[in-house]
Image (spheres, rainbow, N blue to C red):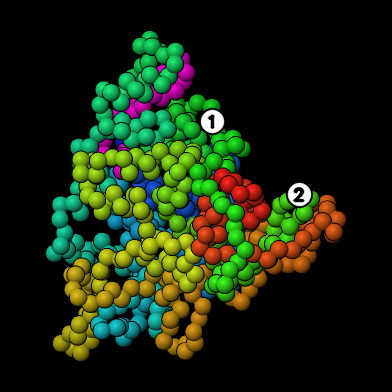
Amino acid sequence: MDKGETNGVSLRGLVDKEKSKIVFVESDEDFIDILFSFLTMPMGTIIRLIRKQPPSSGLGCLKNLYESVENLGVQQFQTAACKNMLLYPKTASAAQWEKLKLKIDDCQFLKYFLCSNKSCTLNGYKLLSPYSDAICDCGKYMNQEMDMLGSKVDNQSPSSTLYDYYGVFVKEQTRVIISDELRVMPPCTEVSLSLLSKLPGSDESTIEEHNFDIGVEEVLSLLKFSLVSKTPLTETLWNSPINELGKEDLHQSGYIKSRLKEPGSNVNEKIQVKLITSKSMNMVCYAEAGEDFVDLLFSFLTVPLGHMAKQMHSGISRGCINHLYNSVQELDAERYLKSNDHKAMLANPKLAPGFSYENKQLGIEEDIHRPYYYAQKKNKSGGWDDIPSYDRISVPPVISFGSPESIFSTLTVKETRRRGFVKGPAMFTITDKLIITPISAISCLSLLSKLNKPVADIEYRLVHVGCEEALHLMVASFVSESVLTDVFLSEPNTKY
């Protein structure tokens, strides 16, 4: 149910005024839903929203990946839609985002587009795409807007329940305690006293109650601080000095890497990458690789934050996002969450429909799109009338998501195209910080000259990237500023 436009949400909290630290806040379902929605955000969306928020560091190399997509020309991608998929990745929880009391992303996640060719149908159904620059099977751009939640659509699905209209992730009237490090806990006396006891030297005279108003800017700040600080609520609501992660924290994600083995008999199933390394510095200067490796790296931008947290579940994560993720796991789903399905959206978030691609080394499940259809029927004059419908009829969804799997299967081009974001064949240079550019001999020599090392110090290594290596690279892109070195050259049991 639409709660209408609001100016923000209100929180009530306890503050240790001597230490300038928030002890905890009390929250209803509106703020909890906003917090939990962080876990469903694709990394590319997070980078786009917070990269200009202070502090400027602490996001690993994902910012470099995002800016590499921005800086590459459209001609480097299969189509403009592929570039937009990475810059504006969709979420599998779009329907939930639409119901949040505060919307921090102004993208229209539930808007769809179709081509203007009336005769282009499959069994009477039109292809739909969430990107206006996707290409229909008939070869035309899908730039005719259709709002799936607008007046053209009957919102009453036969299988709808009250769960579809009330709340987002947690049940209505839910109240919880949220600690400074984003632990979400039941609002009982035992929990609150436990949090107070963790502040040595505090007493009743130093603790005072405060009310906080949260708007979009505060939510964006909290999102950023949840990734780079140990005290995100204090940083956001109390404007205390930034408690950024130190260098030692950047390699303590808990995702422990074992020594990567030499490629086995399945080497042909892996992506081949050439590393240019410095022997004396034991570091990767840069890598040379084709479009398949770049596709893998760029796909990190489509991965939900919750999946990143899941891969780092066994130890300290970036900032406090692990505490938020663990809170979802520990909360009684029957008491606090709308359903076990909603718990799964947070604890095991999926890729948005259409966002997997040919090389699926990360093994993230892709969500199934709701069965929207755009039907047509003949009218009395022999023409076609459009009939948008929510009906869950037994016809397979016919929807083009502008994805690598769908936008290139045109009926007018009878050729097999590679399914990926980047157009190939092509070669790229990838720095240790994941800055990706089209390969250039001059640029490569410039990179080497900056290291001021003799030619004899340079060594070439050929590595192969499969599922294990892909997961290491994904996690390292989030927590490290020397990704290739950490994944391929670091010692066994290195944490990152």
Residue 242 falls inside the magenta stretch: no
Q: In this view, does 249 lie to the left or right of 198?
A: right
**Residue 152 location, x and y as percent?**
22, 67
Q: Decide if residue 79 is in sight here.
A: no
Instruction: Provide the secondary structure element on which disc 1 rests.
Output: loop
Q: Is residue 469 above or below residue 47?
A: below
Residue name at image x 42 percent, y 52 percent? 307
Q: Is residue 389 left or right of residue 108?
A: left
Q: Would you call the spot at circle 1 few (<14 residues within 10 Å), some (14-19), or many (20 or more)?
A: some
Can you tell which mark lies on residue 242?
A: 1
**Disc 2 versus disc 1: nearer the observer:** 2
Q: Name the residue that disc number 2 marks.
A: 281
Q: In this view, does 406 lie above or below 87?
A: below
- The kind of residue tagged 1 is Ile
- The kind of residue tagged 2 is Met
Looking at this view, name the residue that lies furthest to the top. Answer: 205
Of residue 350 and residue 80, the one placed in the foreground of this image is 350
**Residue 285 location, x and y as percent?**
72, 56
Q: Which of marks 2 and 1 is nearer the N terminus?
A: 1
Res 36 quadrant in image: top left
* C-alpha gap between disc 2 and disc 1: 32 Å
Q: Decide if residue 348 is in sight here.
A: yes
Instruction: Provide the secondary structure element on which disc 2 rests.
Output: loop
Residue name at image x 67 percent, y 57 percent? 431
Residue name at image x 46 percent, y 20 percent? 20
Of residue 378 and residue 167, the one placed in the foreground of this image is 167
Q: In this view, does 466 lie to the left or right of 288?
A: left
Of residue 90 and residue 80, the one placed in the foreground of this image is 90
In the image, the segment drawn in magenta is 12-34
